[in-house]
Image (cartoon, helix red, strand yellow):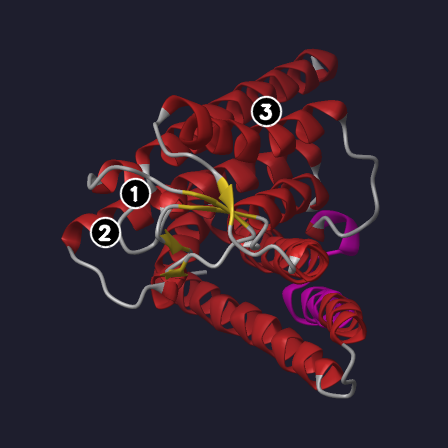
Amino acid sequence: MNVLKIIGKNFGVIILAIAVLLIGVVVGDLGRNMFSDYYLKLMVSCVLRVASTMALAWFVSAKLLKISPDELGIKPKRIELKWIIIAIALPVLVLAFYAFVLPGKAHIAENDMLCKTLFRAILETGITVGIAEELIFRGMIFRYMKKTLGVKLAVIIPAVLFAILHIMNMQSFNLTDLILLVLAGSSVAVMFTLMALDSGSIYPGALAHALWNALIIGGIFGVGAIVNGAPNTAYIVIPVESASKLLTGGNFGVEAAVPAIVCYIAAAMICFVWYKKKLQRAESQAG
C-alpha cells in the first residue's frame, strides 16, 4: 500500500469516526426532546447517545475497518486499581492546587442547583462524553492508525486532532491561548491513549475522562472565570486571583493551564512506564 493511499484511508477513517460521534449526539438529542422532565431527559439522552455510538462504532469497525470488538476495546473488562487512582488523582490534585495553594477562596454560587448540577455533571458531561470520545479517539481512530501507521504515529496524530477539535469551544483566543490548548489537549490525549494501549480497553480512559469532566467542567466545581471556553456558572466556584494565562488557561480555562498540563504529562509518563514494563514482561515470556 503506497503512502498516499494509507494517508487517504486514515483521513477517511477520521471523517467516518467523527460522523459516528455526531450521529450519537443527534440520537441523544432526539431522546432528550421526547421528555419534559429534567432528570428523565438526561437519563434517556445518556443511554441513547452511549448505546447508539457504541453500536455504530462496533458496526463500522467490524464491517469496514476490520477491527474486532476486543481490539476496539469495547468488551467489558475489570478496571485495575492503578487506573482508578489516576482517574481520581487528576481532578483532585488540580482542584486542590487552586483551592489551597493559590489564594482564591471557594464559595457556593448556586445554592438551589446541587441535585440538577450533580445529575448533569455525572450523566451528561461525565459518562456520556467520556465514553463517546474515548470510543471514537482511543477506539476507532487510534486502533486503525495503529494497524496502518504504527504505534508512535497512532498516539501522536489522534492526540493533536483531539486538541484541535476543542478549539471550537473557545469564543476567542490569541496565540498564547492556542498554544496552551494544543499542549494541554495533546498531552491529556496521549495519557488516555497510553491507558487504552496498556489496558487493551477504552474503559480506564473513559473513567478518567468522565471523572475529570464531571468535577472540572461539569458544573460541580468551576475554577476561574472561564470553564471549557464558557463563563463559569458552577455550583462551587474557585476563583483564580491571577492574570497569568499560565494559571488561568486563557480563554479555555484551567484545563489548559500549566498546573493541569503538568498533571497530564506526569500521568502520561507513569502510563508509559507501565506500558513499557508490560512489553518487557511479554518479551521475556516469549523468549
Identity of the amino acid at label 1? Thr
Is residue 56 covered in magenta?
A: yes
User: Which three-letter amino acid code belongs to the residue tagged 2?
Assistant: Asp
Looking at marks 3 and 1 on the same chain, the residue that comes earlier in the sequence is marked by 1
* Residue 274 in the image: above or below residue 139: above
Secondary structure of the residue carrying tag 1 is helix
Q: Is residue 148 above or below residue 171?
A: above
Closer to the camera in the image, 54 or 250: 250
48 to 179, vertically: above or below: below
Residue in view at x 77 percent, y 88 percent? 34
| Identity of the residue drawn at 53% across and 21% down | 270
Provide the residue designation for mark 3: 275
Q: Residue at x 64, y 56 (%)?
A: 121
Q: Residues within 10 Å of mark 3 (few under 14, many from 20)?
A: some
Query: Residue 21's x, y, as percent?
Result: 59, 70
Q: Main SS of the magenta segment? A: helix
**Residue identifier under label 2:** 177
Image coords of residue 193 (percent x, y): 54, 41
Q: Secondary structure at mark 2?
A: helix
**Quarter residue 69 falls in:** bottom right
Instruction: Residue 175: give its label.
Output: none
Horizontally, residue 243 falls left or right of residue 43, namely left
Magenta region, residue range: 51-71
**Residue 248 circle label:** 1
Q: Could you give the CA–CA distance between mark 1 and mark 2, rounded to whole angstroms?
A: 10 Å
Q: Tell me which amino acid carries mark 3.
A: Tyr
